[in-house]
Amino acid sequence: MADRDRPYMQFNFLVNLGGGADPGSIQGGFQEVTGLSTEIAQQDYRVGNAPHNNVIKLTGLNKAADVTFKRGIINPTALFDWINQVREGETNSRRTITVELQSEDHRTVARWTLNEARPLKYTLGGLNAKGNDAAMEELVIAYERLAVERV
């Protein structure tokens, strides 16, 4: 990867929800992705007979934050079918989701992979007959582990 003197712009990205006949295909069309993060907890530990009066920092559990996807409604049943799979308790309802950041010439430069993902919440934005905004939907996803890759 060539060195850059400025950061990549945030508006070129692709989302793959990991479903459908071809899991490698892009099913994006999202306007916004927020909340991609991971946190590693620490545990303080001190042996009672330690010669120094300080704690040792131990690595604790990994915790991934929920991610929110927002988009204009294109096919309202596609996301809702996945929500129904989770509600019905289907064992294969968890997916691997990828979010790819692209450069100005549409080459993937970074990839975030959300492992063991499942929907938590679906929200339809307000409908207003006097407005001229696009109808929006919001999907909150829970996942167990975040992987980050520079391409």
Image (cartoon, rainbow, N blue to C red):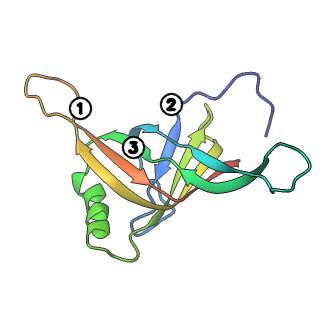
The residue indicated by pointer 1 is: 134
Q: Quadrant of residue 92?
A: bottom left
Instruction: Give the amino acid at mark 1.
Output: Ala
Give the number of the disc on residue 69: 3
SS category of the residue bearing label 2: loop
Report the side of 98 relative to 3 (left or right). Answer: left
For the point 30% across and 51% down, the residue is 121
Q: Mark 2 or 3, which is nearer the eye?
A: 3
Q: Assess disc 3: are there few (<14), some (14-19) or many (≥20) residues with their C-alpha within 10 Å of its C-alpha.
A: some
Single out the mark in the foreground, 3 or 1.
Answer: 3
Residue sitting at 30 percent across and 69 percent down? 85
In this orientation, which residue lies closer to the viewer: 127 or 22? 127
Q: Where is residue 63 in the image (x, y as percent from the top left)?
A: 56, 52
The circle drawn on residue 11 is 2
Whole-number angstrom distance, CA of label 2 to CA of label 3: 14 Å
Give the secondary structure at mark 1: loop
Q: In the figure, is residue 93 to the left or right of 149?
A: left
